Amino acid sequence: MNKSNNQNYQFVCTLTFGDIYGQIIVWLITITISLASALALMGARRPVYALATVGLVVLLSLPFLLFAFVTTLLNHIELTAVDPGTKTETEPIPGNVSQQKPVQASS
């Protein structure tokens, strides 16, 4: 076996909170609407329908939410070739660096 192509690769994830923020907001609105409809049905004669409504909405919306998260994550994964002679230390990507300082405990 001849290894003439000795190539190294760098794995970088550029996902930020802003990329999934809209998806989270839409799902929270969906859950809020289902809870509102459950409260409306709670006054009916059969409150089991209220619980079934919330369960059904969560059960049906969760796969779509997970699909959106996973596809967004996969779209933000970069695999770049790196020369074997160069350092493999990762340098922060300018658009992905947080400007916040870590929290320190005060006494």
Image (spheres, helix red, strand yellow):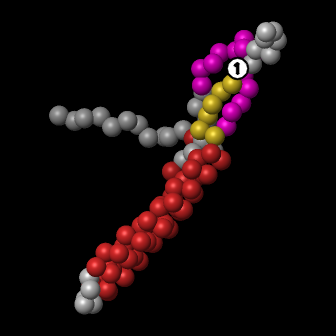
Q: Is residue 31 visible?
A: no
Front residue of this view, candidates 10 and 18: 10
Which portion, as a residue range, is magenta? 78-90
Residue at figure coordinates x 31%, y 86% from the top left: 41
Is residue 79 one of those drawn in magenta? yes
Residue at left 67%, top 37%?
A: 78
Q: Secondary structure at mark 1?
A: strand
Q: Indicate the position of residue 19 as horizontal and vertical percent values.
A: 57, 53
Residue 39 in the image, given as x and y percentages of width and height: 30, 82
* In this picture, residue 60 sits left or right of residue 83: left
Tag 1: amino acid = Asn
Q: Residue at x 60, y 41 (%)?
A: 14
Magenta stretch holds residue 74:
no
| Viewer-closest of 91 and 47 | 47
Magenta-colored segment: predominant secondary structure: loop
Give the residue at mark 1: 8
